[in-house]
Image (cartoon, helix red, strand yellow):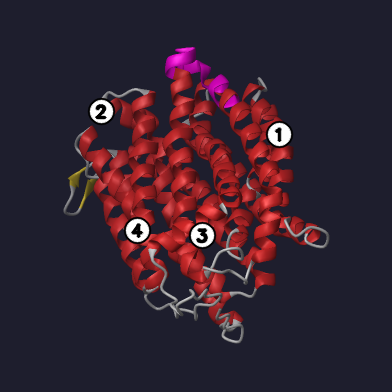
Amino acid sequence: MNNNTDAYPSFRTANTTLIILFAIYVLSFVDRQILSLMVGPIRETFGISDFQFSILYGSAFAITYAIAGLPLGRLADQFSRKHIIAGSVAFWSVATCMCGLAKSFPSLFISRMMVGVGEGGFAPGAYSLVSDSYRPKHLGFAMAFLKSGVYVGSAASLVLGGVLIEYFTSQEDLRFPLFGSLAPWQATFITVGAPGVLLALVMLLVREPVRRDMVVTADGNTRLPLRKVLGFLWVRKRTYLCLFVGSSMLSMASYGGTAWYPEFFIRTYGVSRTEAGGLYGSLLFICGLSGIFLGPVLARVLAKKHTDFYLRTILYASIVAAVPAVLAPLAGSKTLTLVLLVPALTFGSMYLGIMAASFQPITPNQMRGQMTAFYIFLTNIFGLAVGTSVMAAFTDFLFKDDSMLLYSIATANALFYPLAIGLFAYGLKAYRASMEEAGNWTL
């Protein structure tokens, strides 16, 4: 096995790469999540239900995002990661602008699918670049910083989206060069999509680090056929499935909340769309960032006594987040809901950076892009495609009343969190074995 332990880039180079990746990650979440503030306008434009909107928000994006990530993850393990990322950013940015030009529900659906295809190429290459840029003792904090883009981007999509929609709505004759007359929600899509083309060009300036932790097969080959990758995963299925399926349960709660909490505040407490975006977006920003950076701190404390410190951190945080996550939508007052959301979002966000770091040391370099893609596949199929639709399905088909959205959110969290906690607890023993094996793999 080739470790290349003397080939880490300087902190300046590593941090520059990380900041560029972070900016791209923020943009990706703005582009994918801004749809949550457009429930009313898009329903009115195309005459669709909550459930149809949830498919547009979730399945249209998540399925193509997850599936496209699998081949793109394998390419990231074999070819230039920065080129794959740059091409992906340019593709999804153009697709986001196309969402703003949609004239029918099917055309918006297809454009949304294309956004998913483009974004599928980011995470596998980004995780791999970060893991090769930082020494193990710094990896958790570097991943936490990268993953904080989830909350910065989600919050920005709500806050910025609310401002943009309000601004464009105030314009009497809304016309864009080349595009002509547009609705406010269409203009918002084009405004947030265009900057991505510039970020794609910036990504090309990144200097790729040397790949390390490479496993060599018995015949001396470092390029692994797919059957070797699948075989490695199958032997360690308890470790990876508990990590990935458990985090998928948390992503169902997270994505579902981000998609429906703004509308919850509007329907339950009668606030404006701008206030709903500002309330939840600001809370998501503050609590999400706090939690994601507290994760590595708690992991470092647990690392003094436990080799399974990454997974144990996620388990403990999920236990603390579960009860307030269920109670928050049922609180009965806007203030109490916001108070309960503080621990729910803070501890509920801790898994993101830790999970991204947790499977890097137990995975050979030539598989990290593919394992990341598999992780993304599961968390997005469950989180975006299922999580957002489950909450909408509860509202449309179980409670059959738009005003019952609060019960849909509470019911979903009462299901997702216990399932996640059980999987993480079950996976502790297998994860300890994988950590002890790290660096001594045989294929």
Q: Mark 4 vs mark 3: give the one in front.
A: 3
Q: Position of residue 27 (x, y in %)?
A: 43, 56
Q: Mark 2 vs mark 4: give the one in front.
A: 4
Instruction: Measure how far apart labels 1 and 2 are at the Cα level.
Output: 36 Å
Q: Mark 1 vs mark 4: give the one in front.
A: 4
Q: Residues within 10 Å of mark 3 (few under 14, many from 20)?
A: some
Q: Residues within 10 Å of mark 1 (few under 14, many from 20)?
A: some
- Residue 415 image-quadrant placement: top right
Badges 4 and 3: C-beta atoms under 8 Å apart?
no
User: If you read the primary sequence from the N terminus, does the residue marked by circle 4 or circle 3 appear first?
Assistant: 4
**Location of mark 3 (residue):** 232
Q: Residue furthest front?
A: 218
Instruction: Measure how far apart labels 2 and 3 are at the Cα level.
Output: 47 Å
Q: Position of residue 310 (x, y in %)?
A: 69, 56
Instruction: Measure how far apart labels 4 and 3 are at the Cα level.
Output: 18 Å
**Location of mark 4 (residue):** 71
Where, quadrant-wise, is the N terminus in this rendering?
A: bottom right
Instruction: Measure how far apart labels 1 and 4 are at the Cα level.
Output: 43 Å
Query: Is 208 included in the stretch rendered in magenta?
Result: no
**Location of mark 1 (residue):** 339
- Residue 73 image-quadrant placement: bottom left
Type of the residue with mark 1? Val
**Location of mark 2 (residue):** 46
Taking the image as shown, residue 307 lies to the left or right of residue 423, namely right
Query: Is 405 included in the stretch rendered in magenta?
Result: yes
Q: SS for tag 4?
A: helix
Q: Position of residue 171 (x, y in %)?
A: 30, 41
